Image (spheres, rainbow, N blue to C red):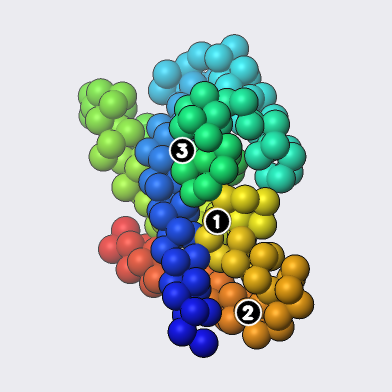
Amino acid sequence: MPLLLERLWQGLLDTLLMVGVSSLLALLVGIPLAVFLVTSGRGGLFEAPRLNRLLGTIVNLFRSVPFLILMVALIPFTRLVVGTTYGVWAAVVPLTIAATPFFARIAEVSLREVDLGLIEASQAMGCRRRHIIWHVLLPEALPGIVGGFTITLVTMINSSAMAGAIGAGGLGDLAYRYGYQRFDTQVMLTVIVVLVAMVSLIQLGGDRLAGRLNKRA
């Protein structure tokens, strides 16, 4: 039991590190990407339809590839970036690349739901385009963005477990090596309980935060 708890703790830390770093990168890249997709379309604040279509195609391309296939396809790029294809940091690269377009599309939907009347009113008052983005578009869409980021985090936890099963470490590696391969039901059930608890806490926290932001809006 002490050995199982030690491995479980290490697996939890590895999973939190994978998901934490990847989600931070996805957040930092995904929001600007979503803003550009919204504002560069026809009639947008920074109209650039050709670039919008090109970027939209790239986003759709990465979203359409299953994570396991994407992870294998990115092995040369992962080795170039982090110097290895095994371990926690090797999993951060495909996790980030998979999560960023996913989150960007969800954030894009929230941004598009902002009342056009608010944007038109801001333009009529002479607000600059960047000020409209910072003070109108993003604040109004923030509850939806938080909800979308919560969904992204849950998806990333699932993907990290899959990555762990093929050498990335974390809870997925623990469940596969010490649970599945050794037919240890106790290990499998323990990992499942931990994953369910993580997802439940993240979903609860995200929902509450989104709800508070929605009340303030």
Mark 1: give few (<14), some (14-19) or many (20+) Cα within 10 Å: many
Quadrant location of the C terminus? bottom left
Looking at marks 3 and 1 on the same chain, the residue that comes earlier in the sequence is marked by 3
Q: Nearer the viewer, mark 3 or mark 2?
A: 2
Residue 17: x %, y % from top left? 41, 55
Question: Separation of disc 2 and disc 1 at Cα?
Answer: 15 Å
> Marks 3 and 1, how far apart in space?
26 Å
User: Which mark sits nearer the N-terminus, 3 or 2?
Assistant: 3
Where, by quadrant of the figure, is residue 6 drawn? bottom left
Of label 2 and label 1, which has the lower sequence position? 1
The residue to which callout 3 is attached is 30
Q: Give the camera-side residue of 149 and 88.
A: 88
Q: Is residue 116 visible?
A: no
10 Å neighbourhood of mark 2: few (<14), some, or many (≥20)?
Answer: many
Number of dots carrying numbers: 3
Residue at 55% in and 14% down: 51
The residue identified by callout 2 is 187
Name the residue beneath numbered marker 1: 169
Amino acid type, mark 2: Val
**Relative height, residue 120 to residue 169 (above, below):** above
Rendering coords of residue 13 (x, y %) = 42, 63
Q: Position of residue 45 (x, y in %)?
A: 41, 23
Disc 3 residue type? Gly
User: In the displayed structure, would residue 1 be above or below residue 113?
Assistant: below
Q: Please tell me which residue is depicted at 73% across the width and 73% down the height of the picture.
A: 182
Element at label 2:
helix
- Residue 61 position (above or below residue 196): above
Q: Quadrant of residue 129?
A: top left
Q: How crowded is mark 3: few (under 14 residues within 10 Å), some or many (20 or more)?
A: many
Task: Name the residue type under label 1.
Answer: Gly
